[in-house]
Amino acid sequence: MYKILAVDLDGTLLNSRKEIPTKNLKALLEAQEKGLIVVIASGRSTPGTMHIAKELQLEKFGGFIMAFNGGMITNCKTDEILFQKLLPLDILPKVYEFSKTGDFQITSYKDYHIISEDISNKYIQYLSFANRMEARQTDDFIKTVNYPVPKYLIVGDPEPLHELELKMRKAFEGKLNICRSDPFLLEVLPYEINKGYSLKILLDKLNLKREELIACGDGFNDRSMVEYAGLGVAMENAQQEVKEVADYIAKSNEECGIEEVVRKFILS
């Protein structure tokens, strides 16, 4: 019996308008009424997921936000931070240097804002829209982001960004987790942090087993949790490497694949 569902947002729970389709929302509310624990498992910041958590009524039902690709887990009912891991501040100059080797932009979060040296960049604009967070310009990223953060992001066109990913993985091996969540979005995370790793921490705190977990995702950064879960679900629109480790392929995010999963494996 499945007791907990971890669901990615962009490309999974949400449609292309960054909204929860009515069918998905209805199914998740029904399942929570029957005792299902829902975890938002997103690369977004915690503030960037709050409006989704409210729609899902996670505060009422006792759900969780696992933000920053697993870098922070928050109990929505109590606002308690159950787990957090931050990047060491002294790593920023080295990461920043890599971000300046091509047509890329580095960004991170400050309170309820996205910080960037070029807020006109189309990928920064996308992040602002998706997270419902204002993008704020800075002339000096290193001086502005002078505090430990859960992650940095580097955005750019997919092909050169993939090349940068390979270079950074080699340079920071054993020190950082470097992965893409979207073809145009490179995540720079604390070492070992990923969605699968942090879901294990949450399950341990809740005295639940991985066999009781369903994890649904589509992006490169979802692979770890889809592979870890008792039932790993890839959306029809998922990256091929996510589909390869999934136990089940659901309909696409535009076709309400989450409703399909909830009704087939939880409510049936």
Image (cartoon, helix red, strand yellow):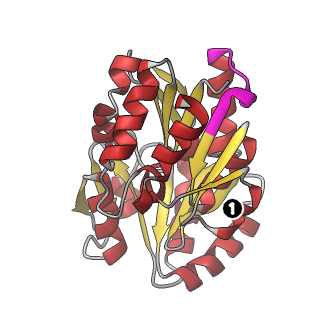
- Image quadrant in which you'd find residue 139: bottom left
Residue at 45% x, 84% y: name it.
103
Q: Is residue 176 left or right of residue 135?
A: right
> Tag 1's secondary structure?
helix
Q: Is residue 122 left or right of residue 257?
A: left
Closer-to-camera residue (14/70): 14
Closer-to-camera residue (6/126): 6
Residue at 33% x, 18% y: name it.
60
Q: Is residue 181 left or right of residue 33?
A: right
Three-letter amino acid code of the residue under disc 1:
Lys
Q: Report if residue 63 is visible in the image.
A: no
Instruction: Examine the structure image and report whether residue 151 is included in the region drawn in magenta.
Output: no
Q: Report if residue 171 is visible in the image.
A: yes
Residue 29 x, y percent position in the rendering: 37, 29
Count how many numbered circles sit on residues in the image.
1
Residue 53 x, y percent position in the rendering: 34, 34
- Image quadrant in which you'd find residue 97: bottom right
In the rendered view, tell whether residue 87 sits above or below residue 268. Answer: below
Residue 37 x, y percent position in the rendering: 51, 24
Q: Quadrant of the C terminus?
A: top right
Q: Quadrant of the N terminus?
A: top right
Spot the residue most to the front.
Answer: 268
Dot 1: few (<14), some (14–19), or many (≥20) neighbours within 10 Å?
many
Residue at 52% x, 30% y: name it.
267
The residue labelled by disc 1 is: 243
| Image: magenta residue range | 206-214
Q: Is residue 248 left or right of residue 45?
A: right
